[in-house]
Amino acid sequence: MRESGIWRIISTGAKDAFFNMALDEALLHSCQNGWSPPVLRLYLWSPPAVSLGYSQRTSKTVDLKRCRDRGIQVVRRITGGRAVLHQDEITYSVCASTDDFPQLGHNTLQTYQKISTALLESLRFLGVEGEWVKPPSNHNPSSRHPGQSKPCFASSSRYEITVGGRKLIGSAQRRFSLPSVQGTRRSFIQHGSILTGKGEQSLAELLPGDLAVEKMRRTLENSATDLEQIVKRRIEPKEMASALKMGFAKVFASRMEDSEVSSEELEAASTLKEKKYLRDEWNLLR
């Protein structure tokens, strides 16, 4: 198949929650402004963290004291979706301008489907046969109540990846239309969490006090799975990165080039971390 373009693939290892979200936004800005081709970034979280969906109310989603007592950071994403505990998982983000790369889809569901296809192909390189969840005909991605506290891996929705009916990869996306000298430019960022172990079940212990911990733990255990359960061994980040590189290259007929964060992107991320992601005004929507 003829190559349709070049992607950057960036692996940044384990970083704190606030830098992780700041860097993703800085990479999105690079794509929005036409300074970068599509970016696939892979990373871990140290210390563990809970990320909240853009519209979730903190008090209905997570118990901040329990998180503090356990050394777990809490950060708000710029993408939607629901709470995720980043522990025993690998996070991916995809940023791109859909004006420059229309093959990534013209709306939310098209882009979900295309990225999910690449994720399924990537899993095959690990010997895992997954499937996506088809959206219902009356699906409305904005219909969810913004204050709901149910965790991301407690259920599956549109084009998320399951194995044996249990969720393996949860994703959230947000699209932007921004004015520029060339006119309105359209872009998106999609976050996703690939479970590698059972750590996500611990999120049940971090939910608000009026929720039944054991009931939610059982819900998470029954509704989610992880790579270690599936392949009966630990999948290391480098192996996952290699599989994703091959899967995305095949599906998008593109060359995936290993890349570093530029000095400009790093500076932008440092500023965003300091002025946005470290601040309660951003993270603690009441």
Image (tube, grey):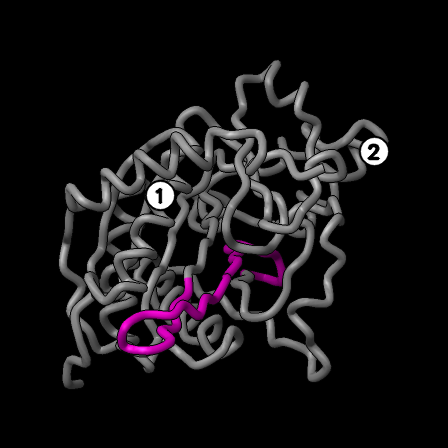
Quadrant into which the N terminus falls? bottom left
Secondary structure mostly seen in the magenta stretch: strand
Q: Which mark is residue 235?
A: 1
Q: Amino acid at mark 1?
A: Ile
Can the viewer see residue 88? yes
Q: Residue at x 57, y 38 (%)?
A: 200
Question: Dividing the picture into quarters, in which one does residue 84 lie?
Answer: top right
Q: Amino acid at mark 2?
A: Ala
Q: Nearer the viewer, residue 70 or 230?
A: 70
Pinpoint residue 247: horizontal percent, then vertical percent. 29, 66
Q: Nearer the viewer, residue 171 or 28?
A: 28
Q: Which mark is residue 212?
A: 2
The stretch in magenta equals 163-188
Q: Residue at x 49, y 38 (%)?
A: 197
Can the viewer see residue 198? no
Is 166 in the magenta? yes
Q: Residues within 10 Å of mark 1 (few under 14, many from 20)?
A: some
C-alpha gap between disc 2 and disc 1: 32 Å
